[in-house]
Amino acid sequence: MWGLSSVTFSLDFLNVFGEVLNDYNTNDIAFSKFKAPSAATDTSVVIVNIGELSRAGIAQQIDILNKFDPAVIGIDVEFELNTDPIEDSILAASFANTKNLVLWSKVTDGKPDSLNEHRALWDTLKLVNPMFSKLAYHGYTNALTEGESEFETWRETSSVEHIIDGRKEYSFATKITQRYDSAKAQVFIDRNKDYPLEIINFRGNLDKFTVLDINDVLDTNFVAETIKGKIILMGYLGADTRSKTWDGDKYYSPLNERPVGRVPPDMYGVVVHANIVSMILHNDYIDTIPQWLVYFIAIFMCFVNVALFSWLSESEFWGPWYGIVSKVIQLIEIVGLIYIMLYFFINQNIKLDLTITFLSTALAGELIEIYEVVVQNLSKIFTGKSAMLKGKNV
């Protein structure tokens, strides 16, 4: 069963379908259909749209926000290259006047760590322009699925990634939370020793955070309490927050209304970061059962099914009905396993990885029939050969 679960296929004409199916995750159904989002808006995180503003325009937003004493400002913008020297100087001056500023970084060219199977090593750490980086902290903003497929869903994050030269780079959300509540951030970092990739427990989309559009900030269309002591996340939310276009820095999330057969991407990158920050601040994590328990459940269910189906196939009463009865039992078991998995995910924030269990349940009956045919045929062959040998001996 483990072998079958590890089989992959590569057919060019099925690539699109393969990408969609490979990215399918039953827990997406829980998020999009059953898992009730938090009723409360997280007012500790304020998302600010920078739209198509120039660097001078972003600097103007920052200067206005700084007047209201935010706790942290995180900006999910690359700022990697030089542009207009005057605008760069204006932006640098605004950065210098921001007390807790976290800027973009990116880890690239990753490969598995030979010493630790649960983490990657990255060749390169990209930072913003040096004239900006010296004025701020930085954290990587990568979606860990980035570049693998245009159909990828952003489900997971980590607290820290490792560069091949020995440096550590904290995630954008982790670094922001460290500047806001270091104790909460440390809980997240400590968890990642056991859960290298953390499932993002999404609070919701823009409706679950305080959101200020471009002109809301430039026209000071908010009260002081909206900003004072809060985490401000600045990033791209389209030309304005009402935009529904499929444009840059927009991803699929598990909240997408169609887990398979996609509508356009539903969540901007800065909103994903807001969800991660919110998860850390509220200690609202999704736990994963250990791998040994995954295999124990699979082996136990496989044993039970083999014992049950073997008895059914040999029973005088049930034997003639074996094909129908075994399929009904398999269907009931699969529906039951899906229900159990969704129940624990929705109500207990526990993810059950039952992939191998599903396979053993779905295939046990058929494999028993194959086994019996093979054994019977081999038995006849070897019995016949044994009889022939005995005849020769006589």
Image (cartoon, helix red, strand yellow):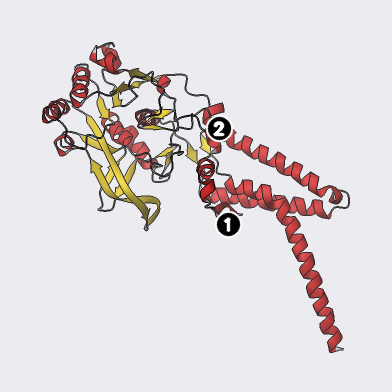
On the rendered image, what quadrant is the C terminus found in? bottom right
Residue 34's mark? none
Task: Identify which residue, 352 or 73, lies in the foreground.
Answer: 73
- Residue 325 coordinates in the image, percent (x, y): 79, 44
Picture coordinates of residue 268, whole percent (x, y) = 38, 29
The quadrant of the image that shows the N terminus is bottom right
Label 1 to label 2: alpha-carbon separation: 27 Å
Q: Amino acid at mark 1?
A: Gly
Determine the image quadrant of residue 275: top left
The residue to which callout 2 is attached is 29
Q: Is residue 251 left or right of residue 160?
A: right
Q: Quadrant of residue 237?
A: top left
Q: Position of residue 177 (x, y in %)?
A: 31, 31
Residue 283 vertical position relative to residue 380 in the rendered view, above or below: above
Horizontal side of 167 relative to 86 (left or right) equals right
Disc 2 residue type (three-letter) = Ile
Sequence-wise, the earlier of marks 1 and 2 is 1
Element on which disc 1 rests: helix
Badge count = 2
Sort mark 1 into few (<14), some (14-19) or many (20+) by Cα contacts within 10 Å: few
How busy is the neighbourhood of tag 2: few (under 14 within 10 Å), some, or many (20 plus)? some
User: Is residue 215 placed above or below 272 in the rendered structure?
Assistant: above
The answer to whether residue 225 is left or right of residue 134 is right
The residue under the point 78% across, 74% down is 382
The residue closer to the viewer here, 370 or 317, is 370
Q: In the shown orientation, is residue 390 left or right of residue 13?
A: right
Residue at the spot of label 1: 3
Q: Nearer the viewer, residue 389 or 265?
A: 265
